[in-house]
Image (cartoon, rainbow, N blue to C red):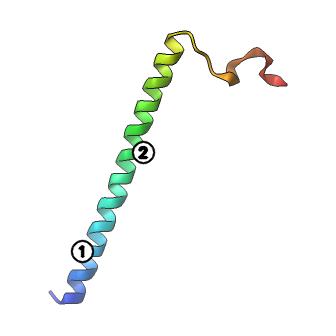
Amino acid sequence: MSAHALYVTAAYGISTLAIVGLVAWVLLDSRARRREMGELEASGMRRRSDRKDAAR
């Protein structure tokens, strides 16, 4: 394997790892935010968009 091929393979590998890491981070963060929203709604807090006077 030439130096150029090694460089290209490493660049693709690092890019793939970075993208997979970002996707995993977004999915895990989304689950955490949904869990937090569920806890808040279970405790009685409601979203502002759910208010009846939100039509203003």
The percent coordinates of residue 22 (x first, y second) are 38, 52
How many C-alpha atoms fall within 10 Å of the one at disc 2: few (<14), some, or many (≥20)? few
Q: Which residue occupies the extreme right position in the image?
A: 56
**For the residue marked with disc 2, what is the amino acid?**
Val
Label 2 or label 1, whichever comes before in sequence order:
1
- Could you tell me which residue is drawn at 33 percent across and 60 percent down? 18
- State the separation of the CA atoms marked 2 and 1: 24 Å
Answer above or below: position of 30 versus 11: above
SS label for mark 2: helix
Q: Which residue is mark 1?
A: 10
Q: Quadrant of the C terminus?
A: top right
- Could you tell me which residue is drawn at 19 percent across and 88 percent down? 3
**For the residue marked with disc 1, what is the amino acid?**
Ala
**Side of 49 where 34 appears, left or right:** left
Q: Which residue is mark 2?
A: 26
The percent coordinates of residue 6 (x first, y second) are 20, 82
**Side of 17 where 30 appears, left or right:** right
The percent coordinates of residue 55 (x first, y second) are 82, 24
- Could you tell me which residue is drawn at 37 percent across and 46 percent down? 25
SS label for mark 1: helix
